[in-house]
Image (tube, rainbow, N blue to C red):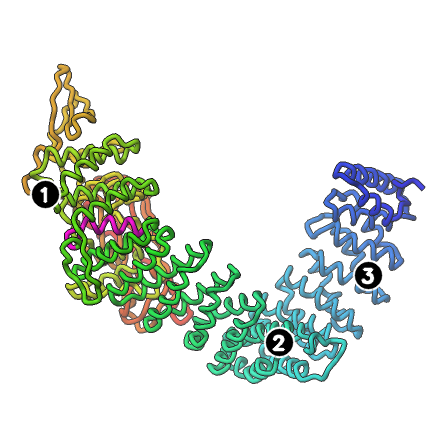
């Protein structure tokens, strides 16, 4: 027989394909076989039609196109014999899907087979319909499937129930037709029918709320009976798995119970006893038992269970954490993360076991356990938990160190109540994992240090000691360099020594040594070296004996290949040589950074009111620190008040990332009255020192001379050269002219008997057309508002941007407020005033409410 003909057996074709040594040989064999099958189809060869379809199914599974054989499947389905129908239906399910138009032709054949006297042919039709049923087929054949649900044959009932699941998923409107039939299936004794019926009821609950209510009333008692019978039934070899009778039925029933009991206290109370029985009697030493217990715990946590039952469920999860199987521990951690919101105290009892999971060798378990520990931290246990995590930070592998460091920093920031403890823990983290600490974290640490005058000496001494033990940690080095530049005299003169400190002696030369070492180190990046140059310039003023050495160090870097360092060195050298009279004013200590402002910038608008309250309650001595607790923070804003050496995303209102005089003086140099914007790009010298410079005439072109350093050369049309000192006009006390920022009073934008909205306004001096509005919402009623949504509309000449609101829950009686930032850009600023329409939607006791308003009382100038 020809090896490539319609008469070739399937096994011969498979053998020929497997014998191919290359993909090209396989494609050649498949191509010849497909050609033979096409010839047989065109010749209407009925003798080998079923064999050809079997071959096409194998070729289809290999990934080759087989669409030319789809009609042959329909012809086989229309055949009278069972073997042909079986191959036809199998090919139909494999070669076609519900999107094929050819499928419309098989509806009539399916209807005939669903009414066939042979139960096996009926089973074939139900199986095919359950796999590829389309919406149209579901509507046409649903009555036939309903009729088959009343069949006496358990196999037909089982297949009909599974087919019904497909139908109601495709056409949810038909769910009510299957309700009573599905409830009847729960009374069957056959386990296959029971499992199918339970799954049908579960899907009915998903697609229809009416179905959920019906099944909750009529099936809860039956589910309890099924679970009792299965859990207490004697040994049955037919359904026994690891000594447990039909765990699959257990799990299906528990899932349906969870759906019925969710949000319904009466149903939950009714099933509490059987859940407690299953949770206490099921064994933990077998995987089947663990699966049942996990599903039982999920059901307990999903319904309105009693507190005792929830504790029992959480204790089961605690035992799961001691299991050797990684999968069991992982799902237990997942469930405990959800359980924290329900009963945090019960989860706290397993804190020791959870901490051990943080040290697990499996990366997935470590990450889940760390998330759970983070949720368990509170004001009471924060210190022991932080100590455990920092101790583990010393030995953790590098892959996990970044995640662990971020969580520790977040915990310390959110829950610290004493500034000294906060500073100590951050110093430990910087010493152990400073390379993994993000910039906003050490920026915030500097803010805290600047606001704690009693701890500044302690901080700089602690950093000095830590620097020599961990000089490779970048963030630690940067904080050390900054603090030595600001508080170097405290380090040398031992100012503000605490009782817990050990005495130490540091000379002025030692302090300069630290900065010089960072400046010449090949491992230091440009930002760290730039900070070291600034700190050296400051020390040259505070330690006069070291000024000569500092000048030599700065002079060496005038020839640096790094443009940033070269420019700084040239500028600082000129300050030392030519402007000694004002150097002390230029390099004076940074003003105390506003801690509440920085917290608001990092936490976003949602924390504005909280941060303000906390800053107002803080004592002047700055001995305590209470950062926003328990509220997730969005991405931190750049800390422009500090040494902004590496950030390119500073706000418009702040100096550009290259405005390093802001690092020295901590002030904004934008002079709105002059109307001259600071130079951009590499023209940083203009940003630094162009203070009080006479304006350049329109017929001149300014240039920066690297030889003159601090001079501005203007070349008028007469080609004469006029040199202007950039520091001319600076007052002797070194203070800079004040920038005028317009201030607008707040307005009541909207007020009703139940809701009040106020707007407060801020503007950027260089963008008068842009206004940032902070909207504050206060609930005046006796009921809390949920799902709170604020929307606004403006005229076409105004652009509007709404940031997310701080919360969608508005407490009653004015006990708290929701804030939301609105940014508007007036395209016709000065010509047309702002106007806005607002829409506020919320729910009161699950009833939707809507309020509308129009705002026309904006202050002039917006």
Q: Which-is-in-front pick, marks 2 and 3?
A: 2
Secondary structure type for disc 3: helix
Residue named by callout 3: 113
**652 over 630 or under it: above or below:** above
686 relative to 373 in the view: left or right: left
Q: Which-is-in-front pick, marks 3 and 1?
A: 1
567 relative to 195 in the view: left or right: left
**111 over 182 or under it: above or below:** above
**356 over 13 or under it: above or below:** below
Queried whether the magenta region covers residue 389, the answer comes back as: no
Q: Can residue 544 be seen in the rendering of this structure?
A: yes
Q: In which quarter of the image is residue 84?
A: bottom right
Queried whether the magenta region covers residue 476, the answer comes back as: yes
Q: Give the range drawn in magenta.
A: 475-490
Q: Give residue 389's position: percent from left, percent from top.
A: 39, 64
Measure the C-alpha gap from mark 3 to mark 1. 95 Å
Residue reaching furthest to the left: 732
Q: In which quarter of the image is residue 270?
A: bottom right
Residue named by callout 1: 735
Per the rendering, the mark at residue 285 is 2
Q: Give residue 134's position: percent from left, percent from top.
A: 69, 55
User: Which comes sooner in the sequence, label 3 or label 1?
Assistant: 3
Q: Nearer the viewer, residue 807 or 179?
A: 807
Q: Which-is-in-front pick, marks 2 and 1?
A: 2
Write the residue at 84% across / 50% down. 75
């Amino acid at each position: 027989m020809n090896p490539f003909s319609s008469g070739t057996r399937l096994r011969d074709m498979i053998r020929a394909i497997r014998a191919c040594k290359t993909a090209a040989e396989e494609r050649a064999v498949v191509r010849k076989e497909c050609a033979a099958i096409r010839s047989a189809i065109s010749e209407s060869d009925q003798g080998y039609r079923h064999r050809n379809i079997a071959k096409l199914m194998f070729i289809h599974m290999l990934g080759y196109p087989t669409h030319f054989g789809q009609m042959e499947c329909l012809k086989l389905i229309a055949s009278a014999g069972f073997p042909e129908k079986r191959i036809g239906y199998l090919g139909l399910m494999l070669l076609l899907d519900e999107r094929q138009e050819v499928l419309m032709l098989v509806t009539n054949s399916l209807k005939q087979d669903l009414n066939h006297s042979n139960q096996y042919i009926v089973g074939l039709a139900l199986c095919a319909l359950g796999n590829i049923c389309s919406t149209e087929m579901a509507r046409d054949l649903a009555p036939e499937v309903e009729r088959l649900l009343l069949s006496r044959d358990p196999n037909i009932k089982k297949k009909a129930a599974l087919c019904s699941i497909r139908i109601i998923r495709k056409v949810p409107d038909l769910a009510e037709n299957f309700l009573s039939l599905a409830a009847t299936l729960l009374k069957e004794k056959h386990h296959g029918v029971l499992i199918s019926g339970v799954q049908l009821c579960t899907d009915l609950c998903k697609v229809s709320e009416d179905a959920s209510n019906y099944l909750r009333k009529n099936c809860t008692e039956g589910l309890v009976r099924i679970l009792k019978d299965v859990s207490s039934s004697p040994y049955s070899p037919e359904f026994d798995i690891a000594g447990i009778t039909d765990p699959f039925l257990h799990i299906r029933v528990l899932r349906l119970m969870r759906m019925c009991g969710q949000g319904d206290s009466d149903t939950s109370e009714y099933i509490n006893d059987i859940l407690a029985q299953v949770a206490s009697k099921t064994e933990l030493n077998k995987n089947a038992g663990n699966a049942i217990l996990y599903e039982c715990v999920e059901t307990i946590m999903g319904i309105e269970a009693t507190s005792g039952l929830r504790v029992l469920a959480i204790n089961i999860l605690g035992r799961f954490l001691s299991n050797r199987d990684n999968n069991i521990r992982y799902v237990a951690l997942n469930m405990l993360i959800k359980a924290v919101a329900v009963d945090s105290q019960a989860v706290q009892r397993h804190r020791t076991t959870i901490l051990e999971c943080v040290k697990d060798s499996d990366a997935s378990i470590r990450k889940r356990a760390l998330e759970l520990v983070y949720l368990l931290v509170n004001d009471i246990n924060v210190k022991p938990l932080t100590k455990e995590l920092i101790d583990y930070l010393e030995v953790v592998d590098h892959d996990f160190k970044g995640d662990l460091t971020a969580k520790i920093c977040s915990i310390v920031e959110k829950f610290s109540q004493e500034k000294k403890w906060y500073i100590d823990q951050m110093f430990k983290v910087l010493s152990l994992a400073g390379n993994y600490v993000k910039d906003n974290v050490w920026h915030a640490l500097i803010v805290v240090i600047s606001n704690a005058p009693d701890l500044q000496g302690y901080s700089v001494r602690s950093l000095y000691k830590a620097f020599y033990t961990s000089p490779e940690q970048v963030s630690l080095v940067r904080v050390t360099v900054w603090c030595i530049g600001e508080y170097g005299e405290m380090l040398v003169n031992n100012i503000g020594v605490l009782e817990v400190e050990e005495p130490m002696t540091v000379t002025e030369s030692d302090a300069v040594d630290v900065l010089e070492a960072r400046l010449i180190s090949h491992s230091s990046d440009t930002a760290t070296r730039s900070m070291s140059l600034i700190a050296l310039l400051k020390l040259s003023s505070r330690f006069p004996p070291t000024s000569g050495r500092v000048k030599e160090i700065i002079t060496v870097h005038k020839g640096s290949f790094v443009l940033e360092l070269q420019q700084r060195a040239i500028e600082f050298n000129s300050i030392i040589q030519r402007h000694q009279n004002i150097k002390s004013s230029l390099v004076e200590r940074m003003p105390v950074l506003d801690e509440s402002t920085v917290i608001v910038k990092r936490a976003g608008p949602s924390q504005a009111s909280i941060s303000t309250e906390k800053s107002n309650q803080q004592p002047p001595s700055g001995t305590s620190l209470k950062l926003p607790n328990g509220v997730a923070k969005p991405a931190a804003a750049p800390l422009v008040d500090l040494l902004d050496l590496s950030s390119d995303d500073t706000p418009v209102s702040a100096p550009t990332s290259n405005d390093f005089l802001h690092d020295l003086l901590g002030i904004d140099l934008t002079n709105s009255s002059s109307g001259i914007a600071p130079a951009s790009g590499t023209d940083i010298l203009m940003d630094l020192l162009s203070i009080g410079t006479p304006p350049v005439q329109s017929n001149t072109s300014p240039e920066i001379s690297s030889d003159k350093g601090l001079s501005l050369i203007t070349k008028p049309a007469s080609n004469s050269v006029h040199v202007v000192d950039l520091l001319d006009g600076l007052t002797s006390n070194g203070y800079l002219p004040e920038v005028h920022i317009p201030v607008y009073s707040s307005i009541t934008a909207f007020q009703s008997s139940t809701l009040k909205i106020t707007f407060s306004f801020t503007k950027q001096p260089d963008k008068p057309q842009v206004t940032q509005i902070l909207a504050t919402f206060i609930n005046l009623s006796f009921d809390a508002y949920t799902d709170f949504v604020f929307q606004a509309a403006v005229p076409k000449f105004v652009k509007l941007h709404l940031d997310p609101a701080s919360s969608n829950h508005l407490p009653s009686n004015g006990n708290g407020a929701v804030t939301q930032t609105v940014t508007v850009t007036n395209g016709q600023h000065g010509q047309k005033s702002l106007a806005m329409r607002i829409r506020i939607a919320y729910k009161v006791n699950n009833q939707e409410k809507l309020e509308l308003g129009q705002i026309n009382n904006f202050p002039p100038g917006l």
